Amino acid sequence: MADKKASVVIIGSGPAGYTAAIYAARANLEPVLISGPQPGGQLTITSDVENFPGFPKGIMGPEMMNLFREQAERFGTRFVEGMVTSVDLSRRPFLVEVDEGRDCWSAETLIVSTGASARWLGIPGEKDYWGRGVSACATCDGFFFKGQEVVVVGGGDSAMEEATFLTKFASRVTVIHRREELRASKIMQDKAKNNPKISFIWNSAVSRVLGNEQGVTGVVVKNLHTGDEAEVHCTGFFVAIGHDPNTQIVKGQLPLDEAGYIKTHLGSTKTDVAGVFACGDAIDSVYRQAITAAGTGCMAALDAERFLEHWVDDRP
Ligand code: NAP
């Protein structure tokens, strides 16, 4: 199949990808945005977004991503539904293959905004009961646990947010954390700790998810100090232990840090390959906010635009 040509190909459709698309489209670069496995990104599995400026009353994550997409579309972004299965950054223009070759693009510049994905514990039962009580998204699945007991694993902002959200439905929420100190911000901790429906089990890890044909029936919890194990009854088990960057497709072609985040040059979205820019959660292990992702998405489009104006391929 002949490659289709684009001056800018954007991989990923979260706040970073859409913002890059808005800027690149307004610069008349007719960007192509390849949406990835979860169009709209992580915000499509979030409830209220209350900290994105411009939405004083808050906005639902999926609705916000629809608005981002609409804005990118308005200025001429071309959308491709599919998953980028490989990129070749050793040739120029770069080659971007979608769905194992169903679609191929040759790109003068590439913006990698592939985001991050939820981490799993990898314990027995977790996969077996996935979708039957095991979840990584309270917003998506909380509704199914009306009047039931649920467990949340993790001690960060995500875990506190999930636990607090789940109290809208569940009769009891037990947070299990491997230390006795939470990593979450003070405000999120206080919200969870002051909620009468939430209780904590400290210094403990879930070692197994139990269940039957109906789904999850409980978890086995191990105290990490004493080694003692106990069963905690629950019908919902929510894993909220952080995320990993989705950077496998560029591994070996772009430098990554030890956690897998793409390394960019200080103060820009440039990578070590001229013409390839990276933004959003794929480069950010620190802030990981929609607004910071959108900010670096904007930077990536401006960097790509400047690159296209000035770069001369002087390789032999
Ligand atoms: P995080 O801050 O990395 O926290 C992950 C939590 O999971 C930590 O408490 C960690 O324990 C625990 N954990 C990790 N691996 C584990 C394992 N294998 N077994 C058991 N526990 C494990 O991740 P996050 O909560 O997803 O937050 C990520 C970023 O997004 C943060 O910057 C956060 O502020 C932001 N965020 C903000 C909001 C908000 O403002 N509304 C909401 C969600 C997230 P340790 O503490 O022992 O390491």
Image (spheres, rainbow, N blue to C red):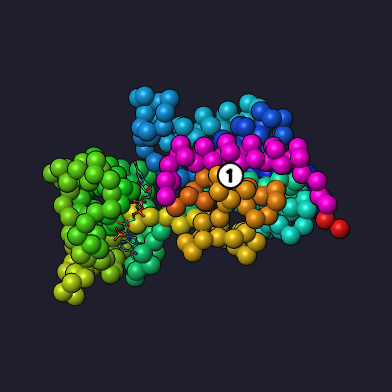
Residue 23 % position (x, y): 62, 32
Residue that appears at 57% across and 29% down: 70
As drawn, is 172 to the left or to the right of 165?
Answer: left
Please indicate whether residue 170 sits to the left or right of residue 25 in the image: left
Residue 296 found in image quarter: top right
Q: Position of residue 242 (x, y in %)?
A: 38, 55
- Quadrant location of the C terminus in the rendered image: bottom right
Give the tally of numbered discs: 1
Residue at 35 percent of width and 25 percent of height: 57
In the image, 173 versus 242, the foreground residue is 242
Residue matched to label 1:
268
- Asked whether residue 263 is drawn in magenta, I would say no
Residue 264 visible (yes or no): yes
Q: What element carries label 1?
A: loop
- At horizontal 36% and vertical 28% (from top left) the residue drawn is 58
Q: Nearer the viewer, residue 307 or 210?
A: 307
Query: Residue 68: percent from the left, percent from the top?
Result: 53, 32
Instruction: Report the magenta residues as a range.
Output: 286-314
Q: Does the residue labelled 1 lie within 8 Å of ligand 1?
A: no
- Given the current orientation, which residue lies at the most extreme left position? 196
